[in-house]
Amino acid sequence: MAFRLTLIRHGVAQGAEQAIFGHSNPALSILGREQLAARWTELSAHPVDAIASSTLARAADFALDAAMSLGIALHLERGFERNESGQHRRQSQSRLERY
């Protein structure tokens, strides 16, 4: 049976211009919501049978809206959150430019 799997990354999170987040959980910024809305317009032109998301707000909030618009369940998965930013976590962009 053939199927189509489409993966998208969350849009810009609040405060993304200032820091690397790692495992923190900021919501999408207005720009991030606009980015995902534009992508969703393209994706929803094709059949969508399931939606899965990490539990991070910047991914799950929009995924829930998309799933609700289609009347399908949202599958949340903590394993999608994995991001190791180590010593750079929550550092400002100006501080990272020194590395």
Image (tube, rainbow, N blue to C red):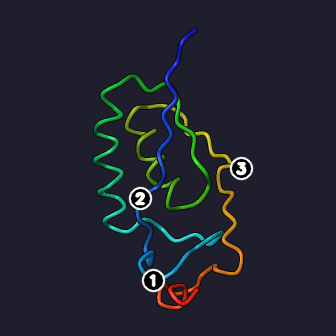
Q: Secondary structure at mark 2?
A: loop
Q: Amino acid at mark 3?
A: Gly
Disc 3 to disc 1, C-alpha distance? 26 Å
Nearer the observer, 61 or 84:
84
Mark 1 lies on residue: 18
Q: Quadrant of residue 24?
A: bottom right
Residue 15 location in percent, x, y? 44, 78
Question: What number is the disc on residue 79?
Answer: 3
Residue 26: % across, % down: 52, 71
Question: Which residue lies at the image location 43% right of the left edge and 74% below the top edge?
Answer: 14
Badge 2 or badge 3: first in the primary sequence = 2
Between discs 2 and 1, the one toward the N terminus: 2
For label 2, the residue is: 11
Q: CA distance from mark 2 to mark 1?
A: 15 Å
Q: Secondary structure at mark 3?
A: helix
- The answer to which quarter of the image holds residue 40 is top left
- Estimate the x, y position of residue 81 in percent, counting from the top left: 65, 56
Q: Is disc 1 surrounded by few (<14), some (14 to 19) or many (20+) residues within 10 Å?
A: few
